[in-house]
Amino acid sequence: MPNYQKLFLKMILSSAAEFRKGNSGDRSSIDSPQARGSQSPASQPVESNGGVSRRRWCGGVAAVLLSTAVAAHWTGLVAEWTGSESTSVFLVSALTRIGMVFAALWLAWDSLRRPARWLPPGLAVLGVVSVVVVTAQPKLIIAILPLVGIVTVLASVLRVFRKGQ
């Protein structure tokens, strides 16, 4: 079982280091045309209109939610505040889950901004639709899983033949 305390501490420390690095005031190396020309596209900033600040915001929200969940679990103040142990467990688990989603978004922010070149665009849409359908009707996973597999293989084969032309 993973040690969530160490993972949480590591996430907080790296978020704080990234925040300090972004607020240092020395933006000349990023904004100068010479620096842009010398960097590869993967190492350049993703966007100049707030992409980095949105990532920091996402990390900050994750840190607040997860630290609130940890504090609520350890102190038991939520149970006193709500008056019900089951409501307290529900709120702590909701804070933890939403915090983990924000932490995952924070970690994957750069890859979310660049589409995967190997993934056909229609397959991504099919994946989202299949997740929604399986969420609504879990028994349909028996039919959807083979369908997604067949479409993935067909899309890959068609892509190989299209590149050959």
Image: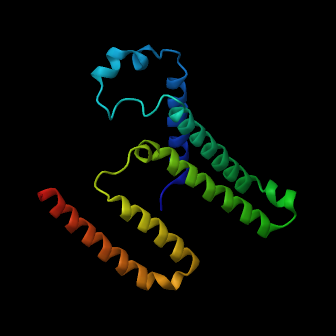
Left or right position of 40 against 129: left
- Percent position of residue 46, x then y: 43, 34
Q: Please tell me whether residue 108 is drawn above or below residue 85 in the rendered image.
A: above
- At 66% from the left and 46% from the top, the residue drawn is 67
- Percent position of residue 37, x then y: 29, 21
Numbered disc total: 0
Give the quadrant of residue 35. top left
- At 42% from the left and 30% from the top, the residue drawn is 45
Q: Please tell me whether residue 135 is drawn above or below residue 34 in the rendered image.
A: below
- At 54% from the left and 53% from the top, the residue drawn is 4
Give the quadrant of residue 80. bottom right
Q: Nearer the viewer, residue 16 or 3?
A: 16
Q: Nearer the viewer, residue 89 or 1?
A: 89
Left or right position of 141 against 93: left
- At 37% from the left and 49% from the top, the residue drawn is 115
Residue farthest along the front direction in this orientation = 165
Position of the C terminus, as image quadrant, is: bottom left
- Percent position of residue 69, x then y: 68, 53
Instruction: Tell me how the rendering is colored.
Output: rainbow
Q: Please tell me whether residue 35 is drawn above or below residue 95 in the rendered image.
A: above
Q: Is residue 13 visible?
A: no
- Percent position of residue 102, x then y: 57, 50
Q: Please tell me whether residue 125 is drawn above or below residue 24 in the rendered image.
A: below
Give the quadrant of residue 42. top left
Q: Is residue 141 visible?
A: yes
